[in-house]
Amino acid sequence: MRRTLTRLALAAALAATALAVAGIVARPHAAPSEEPVPVGQPVDVLADRVARAQQHLRDVPGDWTGWAGLGAAYLEQARVTADPALYPQAEQAARESLKLRHDGNGDALVVLGALANARHDFGAARDRARAALRIDEADADAYGVLADALTQLGDAKGATAAVQRMLDTRPGLAAYARASYDLELRGRIPEAAALMRRALDDAADPHDAAFCHTQLGDLAFGRGDLTTAGDEYASGLAADPASVAAQRGRARVRAAEGDLTGAIADYADLTARLPGPSYLLEYAELLTAAGHPAQAKEQLSLAGNAQRLFTANGGRDELATAALALAEGRPADAVAAARAEWSRRRHPDVADMLAWSLHAAGHDAEALTYARRAVSGGAHPATYAYHLGLINLAQGNRSAARAELRRALDTNPYFSPVDGPAARRALSGLGGAR
C-alpha cells in the first residue's frame, strides 16, 4: 500500500501534512513572496519568506490578503520542517485576515481549510472549503481543499466531483495530482500513473518535479516494479536532492533489493530531517527486519513523541496512534484508536487499520467485515490483500486466504520487509508456495 500513513501523517508526516505537498499546497492568489524555493535550501528560504511577509505586515498591518498569505507561508514551512508548532501561527494569521475582512474573504477560509486538513480535522476542512466556494464558486484552491477533505472522509463520489471541478476550473499539477490519487483509490493504477505524468509535464519548479517523480515511483513500487520505481525516485532526487519523500522511496527500493545497510542509512538521514510518525514507524520496521530490535524501539519512542507534538498543536490522527500501538504490541489500544478514527471518517486506510487491529486483538469475525470494506472501493494493494488473507486464515477460510496471499505477493512481493516474508510463509503453509 502506498503512503498509508505518509499520506496523512505526510504528511503530518505525513508531523506536517501529506495533503499539502509541492504545488498542492493551497495558497491565496494574493499571497506575498511566492517565488520558488531553491533546491537544497528550502527551510532557510521559507523562513526568509515568512520574515518578509511579517515585515510587510508591520508596514501595512491592515493588508488582509497579506495576513492570509502569511498563514499559507507558515503552513508551507510546517510541511517542509515537519514542525506542527507552526500550525497555531498559521491559524492566528488567517484569523487576523478574517478579523480585518470577514465577509468575502475566501483567501483566509482556504488557508484555514488547508490547516484543518493538515491537522486531520477533515470535517472542518470540508466546511471551510464550502464556505470559500460560496464566495467564489470558481476558486480552484478551495476545490482542492474540499477534494482532500472529502477523500479522507470517505465520500468518494463527492471527492471525485470536487476534483473534476478543480480540473475544469484550473487544470494543472495540483488538479492532475489529486485526480491521479482519486483514480488510485478506485484501483485504476495505469490511469493514475498517466495523470501523474501529465502533472509532471506541468511541474513549474524542481520541487514540483520531485513530487511528481516520487508519486510515480510510489505507483510503480506498489505494483512491484522496482526498476521503474528506482528510476523515478532517482529522477526525483536529481530534481531536488533535498526531497525526503524521494529518499524514502529510494530506501524502500534498496530494502527490496536486499541492501538493508543502504536502506537504513537513507532512513536514518531522512528521519533526522523530517521526523514524522509514519517515517519513524517505517524506519523501526526496517530495523526490526535487519535484526536491530533495540534501535527499532528507539524509533518507536521517537514516533510517539512526534505524534504527541502533532496532537499538542491541534492535530488529531488516531490512524497513526493505532499503527504505533500495534508496533508496540498494544492491540487493545490500537482497536480503540482505529475505532475512533473510523467514527470520524470512512477512508479505506482506516478500514484496513481497524481490521488489522481487530485481528491482532483476536476479533477476527469483526475484522473480516472491515477488511472487506477496505477493498470495496476498487483499490486492492498488497497490504490490504495480506491483511485480508491472514484474517481469512484465522477464520478458517483457507481458499480465500490462499487467494489473497497470492494476490498480495503477485501485486508487490516487496510490500513490507517484515510482512512480505510472513506472507510467503503463510502461503507456503497453505500449499501455495511461490
Image (cartoon, rainbow, N blue to C red):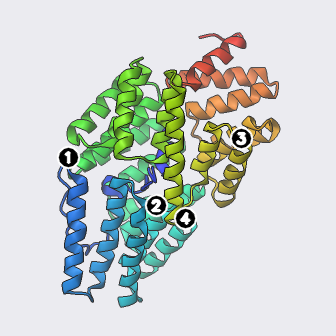
Q: Position of residue 76 (x, y in %)?
A: 33, 61
Residue position for label 2: 118
State how far apart marks 3 and 4 are (Cα). Answer: 25 Å
Eye-nearest disc, 3 or 4: 3
Q: Is residue 350 above or below residue 219?
A: below
Q: Position of residue 307 (x, y in %)?
A: 52, 52
Closer to the chain start, of discs 3 and 1, is 1
Closer to the chain start, of discs 1 and 2, is 1
Q: Disc 1 residue type?
A: Gly
Q: Say which quadrant the C terminus sits in.
A: top right
Eye-nearest disc, 2 or 3: 3
Residue 13 visible in the shown view = yes
Could you say which is closer to the camera, residue 411 or residue 11? 11
Residue position for label 4: 121
Question: Contact (CB < 8 A) between labels 1 and 2?
Answer: no
Q: Which residue is located at x 25 percent, y 68 percent?
A: 50
Image quadrant where residue 328 sits: top right
Q: Residues within 10 Å of mark 4 (few under 14, many from 20)?
A: many
Residue 1 visible in the shown view = no
Q: Disc 3 residue type?
A: Pro
Residue position for label 3: 331
Q: Which residue is located at x 39 percent, y 62 percent?
A: 166
Eye-nearest disc, 4 or 1: 1
Q: Disc 4 residue type?
A: Asp
Mark seen at residue 40: 1
Question: Contact (CB < 8 A) between labels 3 and 1?
Answer: no
Q: Secondary structure at mark 2?
A: helix
Closer to the chain start, of discs 2 and 3, is 2
